[in-house]
Amino acid sequence: MSVIPFVLDAIVDALQGSADLAAVLGPGAADRVLDGPAVADLSSPDGVAVGASRQDESIAFQWPAADLVGIAQHFNINCLAWSGTGSTTFTVCRARVDRILEAVSAALAEDRTLGGLVSQAWITNGLVTQEQTGRGALVVVEFQITVDRF
């Protein structure tokens, strides 16, 4: 049985309970850490979505053959972090997204095993997009949390 569903739950729980992330996102922070993609658009000023991508790919994984002993599970969970303002300037949004990523990284570093579910989990890479919306500047980072289970 794959641990992927349990890992997603553990990451969401870790981020929703993170004091560092709550300090960055402000009041109602736990409500802005989403389990999966946003229902509509990225309408809250700042947030994080676990298991979400703007490319419609949430999780990429390698499935080991059941009869191969000692084969590890390795998978990447796509996530989004975003910040938007009512202005057309990107500087504040970029700085806030950077603080969000630092807080997500710190939350993962508190327990890289996610309660013993995996061997390690960490942020490995990302892609930044900047766009002007009807509500102003929006900076979105698609990042991957890589998970290994030995």
Image: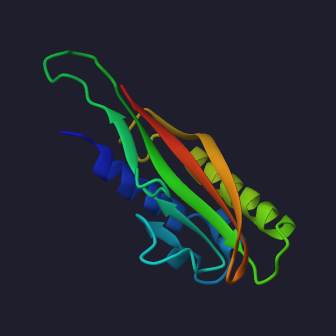
Q: Would residue 17 be seen by someone viewing this image from the given angle?
A: no
- Residue drawn at x 82%, y 67% is 90
Which residue occupies the foreground of this view, 56 or 9? 56
Residue 36 at x, y percent in the picture: 40, 64
Q: Is residue 72 left or right of residue 21?
A: left
Q: Is residue 111 left or right of residue 100?
A: left
Which residue occupies the foreground of this view, 73 or 62? 62
Colouring used for the render:
rainbow
Q: Is residue 8 left or right of residue 43?
A: left
Which residue occupies the foreground of this view, 95 or 148? 95
Q: List the single residue furthest toward the left.
A: 67
Work out whether 70 lies above or below 111.
Answer: above
Work out whether 109 lies above or below 119.
Answer: below
Residue 72 at x, y percent in the picture: 33, 24
Q: What quarter of the picture does the N terminus occupy?
A: top left
Tally of numbered discs = 0
Q: What quarter of the picture does the C terminus occupy?
A: top left
Residue 42 at x, y percent in the picture: 56, 74
Residue 124 at x, y percent in the picture: 59, 37
- Residue drawn at x 19%, y 15% is 68
Quarter of the figure with residue 126: top right
Q: Is residue 34 left or right of residue 133?
A: left
Q: Would residue 61 be seen by someone viewing this image from the given angle?
A: yes
